[in-house]
Amino acid sequence: ARDGHEGLRISPLLLPDAYVDIGQNDPGIGAALEFVELLDRAGLLHEWHLYTGAHEEAYWSAHVEEYLRWYAAHWQGGP
């Protein structure tokens, strides 16, 4: 039986949560969707958001506070 963790050398329970987001018009959307699917299949914790926007400064500026709050909460043992 394959559980999706064959290549991992540490327990999946010890891996950090991941935050993944992308804008609908980002040229990397296909890779992001594949990555999120891989995380899902592997049963790895992550938060996923698909927003409007593209791979540009306006997109990142609009979401930087969200990123910082999410990572800070996880470093502090929050949600």
Image (cartoon, rainbow, N blue to C red):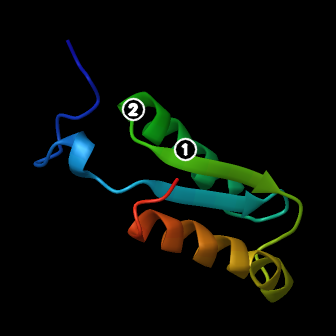
Mark 1 or mark 2, which has the lower sequence index? 1
Quarter occupied by residue 2: top left
Q: Amino acid at mark 1?
A: Val
Residue 76 vs 10, above or below: the answer is below
Which quadrant of the view contains residue 23?
bottom right
Q: Nearer the viewer, residue 65 or 36?
A: 65
- Figure quadrant of residue 58: bottom right
Which quadrant is home to the N terminus? top left
Q: Residue at x 53, y 37 (%)?
A: 37
Q: Name the residue located 85 percent from the left edge and 62 percent from the top edge.
A: 25
List x then y, in percent, for residue 65: 71, 79
Residue at the image point whose x is 83% and y is 79% from the top: 62
Query: Which residue carries the number 2 mark?
Result: 43
> Tag 1's secondary structure?
helix
**Residue at the outermost top position:** 1
Tell whether 17 sits left or right of 21: left
Q: Secondary structure at mark 2?
A: loop
Whole-number angstrom distance, CA of label 1 to CA of label 2: 10 Å
Relative side of 3 to 7, left or right = right
5 and 45: which one is in front? 45
Image location (x, y in percent) of residue 21: 67, 59
Residue furthest to the right in view is 52
Would you call the spot at circle 1 few (<14 residues within 10 Å), some (14-19), or many (20 or more)? some
